[in-house]
Amino acid sequence: MRELVFIAIGGSVGAVSRYLVSKGVNMLSFSIFPYGTLVVNTLGAGLIGFLFSYFNDLILPVHYKSMITIGFLGAFTTFSTYSLESVNLFLGGEYKIGTLNILLNNFISLAAVLAGILIFRLIQNQGV
């Protein structure tokens, strides 16, 4: 139960941080390209890579690690977890699986977004 509370705390801070960073970057960019999301995803990926390595050498209670990686970074960006998993596959010599992970995550996620948009439009046009 304690670990869940820590994850929830980290998640709430991560979600608010994502919003503030993304909005701030987008306001400064004056562009339609979602630089805020790119910055958040890149920062989150860098942080999870760094912290994953750092936590291996650090004696820290598991609930603090979970608060930061699962909670904060999970809410800040799930892209960080996907990136870590892909890199770990490559570092482990699993080049085909790593490539497949990248391709499937990107294409399936894009397809899911499109499917969600199309389902919404169908529901909207049906008056449901």
Image (cartoon, helix red, strand yellow):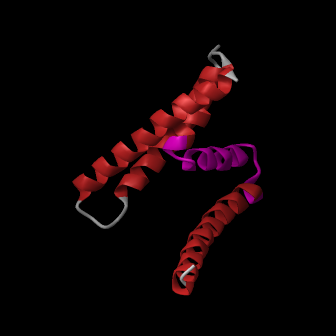
Q: Which residues are magenta?
A: 75-96
Q: Taking the image as drawn, is residue 17 in sight?
A: yes
Q: Decide which of 117, 69 is in the foreground and name it.
A: 117
- With respect to residue 65, does 15 lie above or below? below
Quarter of the image for the C terminus: give it. Answer: bottom right
The percent position of residue 61, horizontal first and vertical second, equals: 65, 16
Which residue: 53% across, 42% down? Answer: 75
Majority secondary structure of magenta residues = helix
Expressed as whole percent of the image width and height from the top left, the position of residue 26 reads 30, 55
Name the foreground residue: 66 vs 31.
66
Residue at position x 76%, y 57% from top?
97
Instruction: Classify 30 as above or below 54.
Output: below
Whether residue 53 is visible here, answered yes or no, is no
Identify which residue is drawn at 69% across, 60% down. Answer: 99
Which image quarter holds the N terminus?
Answer: top right
Q: Residue furthest front?
A: 128
Residue 85 lies in the magenta-colored region = yes
